[in-house]
Image: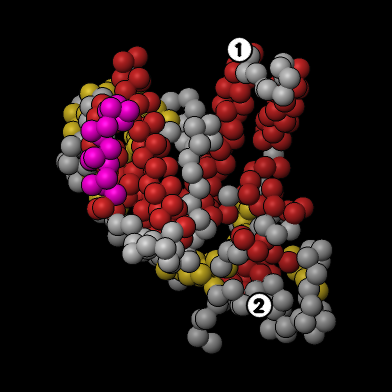
Amino acid sequence: MIKAIKVRIIPNDEQIRKLWMSAGTARFIYNWTLSRQEENYALKGTSKNGGKFISNNDLRKEITQLKKVEQFKWLNDVSNNVAKQAVKDACDAYARFFKGLANKPKFKSRKKSKPSFYNDNVKLKVKKNEVLIEKVGWLRTTEQIPMDTKLSNPRIGFDGKYWYISVGIEQECPIVKLNDESIGIDVGIKDLAICSNGMTFKNINKTKRVKKLKKTLKRMQRQCSRKYEKNKKGKEFVKTKNIKKLEKKIKLLHRKLANIRSNYSHQTTNEIVKTKPSRVVMETLNIKGMMKNKHLAKAIQEQCLYEFKRQLKYKCEFYGINFIEADMWYPSSKTCSECGHKKVKLKLSERTYVCEECGIRVDRDLNAAINLSRYKLAV
Ligand SMILES: [Zn+2]
């Protein structure tokens, strides 16, 4: 099984400059590829190739030509593989859109997108607490990257504070003796997860610590937009030194919140797989549908349910636990977990499930979790 690891790298000033150059090139080529695809798509029906998907290969040939033009000579300053992979990433994203599997890919903005680029895995060299990044040089790492295993898909990125390298490593799955429990998990906004075995994981966004950070973030954002208003020259917004400072602080706060949420997700999913069940059942997430509710959209986004599910899924795989997604129409909430009676209607506001058949009163989410745990089990 491939496990992704993320290790901090410590570049010197010259290396920092080169890292930014590589990330900038990756972003430029990614956007260039998208716009080439879009331009061509717009020519639908007007020429022989119009409207068709341009292949990865053809675009790479175009880039080879582009590099010879004076204006784009700077593309030669970074590794060839950075551009190669950026073309592929953009083509893959566009192909998914073409096939109707995803929304139209967005251009990466300098301000909002995460700076990152690819390093060819054959060219990646590792020695004691150091890693070689093409055309950047040997960089110190804070942890040892495994030396005796195959490394895959190395990506270098900046998270607003530090540079990291993330890379996939081959890992053997341990042989774990599982018990015969099937755990159903109901996820939501009130709590992150309620498990059929009684384990409950609260919503991290409702804790004092996160609430306080969010409050600070909001205050800074307001301060920032006030400063923009104040320094407006005519219709133009001017970015002062103070604004830049404040924006950096805002970025770091976003980073901190993201880290807290991700750590919490790891902690909860670890605790679930540590009970060694043989089966874990989760409902199919319909986030797109859930996000339609404007009042809940932000709370859902902050809950990072996809990330929770992604982590739980690969951790189950790792331990040999059967991970199952119940189909969207499985009535986990409406069914009574005691007698099997099915309600016709259940309002979102009904936090306690009261069965009109057997009279049981049970927490709504726990009831759903118990039903999920029994999903498609032979009676
Ligand atoms: Zn009942």
- Asked whether mark 1 and ligand 1 are closer than 8 Å, the reply comes as no
* Rendering coords of residue 129 (x, y %): 25, 26
Is 313 on the left-hand or right-hand side of 185? left
Q: Residue at x 77, y 82 (%)?
A: 344
Quick check: can you spot residue 295?
yes
Residue 62 shown in magenta:
yes
Q: The N terminus is located in which quarter?
A: bottom left
The quadrant where residue 258 appears? top right
* Rendering coords of residue 277 (x, y %): 46, 65
Circle 2: element type: loop
Query: Dominant secondary structure of the magenta stretch?
Result: helix
The quadrant where residue 221 appears? top right
Is 122 on the left-hand or right-hand side of 183? left
| Residue at the disc numbered 2 | 331
Circle 1: element type: helix
Magenta residues, start to end: 59-74
Is 245 on the left-hand or right-hand side of 121? right
* Rendering coords of residue 6 (x, y %): 37, 37
Q: Earlier in the sequence, mark 1 or mark 2?
A: 1
Q: Residue at x 47, y 65 (%)?
A: 101
Q: Amino acid at mark 1?
A: Lys
- In the image as oriented, which residue stretches furthest toward the top? 241
- Asked whether mark 2 and ligand 1 are closer than 8 Å, the reply comes as no
Q: Amino acid at mark 2?
A: Pro
> Which numbered tag is attached to residue 258?
none
At label 2, counting other C-alpha atoms closer than 10 Å, the crowd grade (few under 14, some 14-19, many 20 or more) is some
In this picture, is 38 found above or below 72? Answer: below
| Residue at the disc numbered 1 | 241
* Rendering coords of residue 243 (x, y %): 64, 18
Q: Nearer the viewer, mark 1 or mark 2?
A: 1
- In the image as oriented, which residue stretches furthest toward the front? 46
The quadrant where residue 247 appears? top right
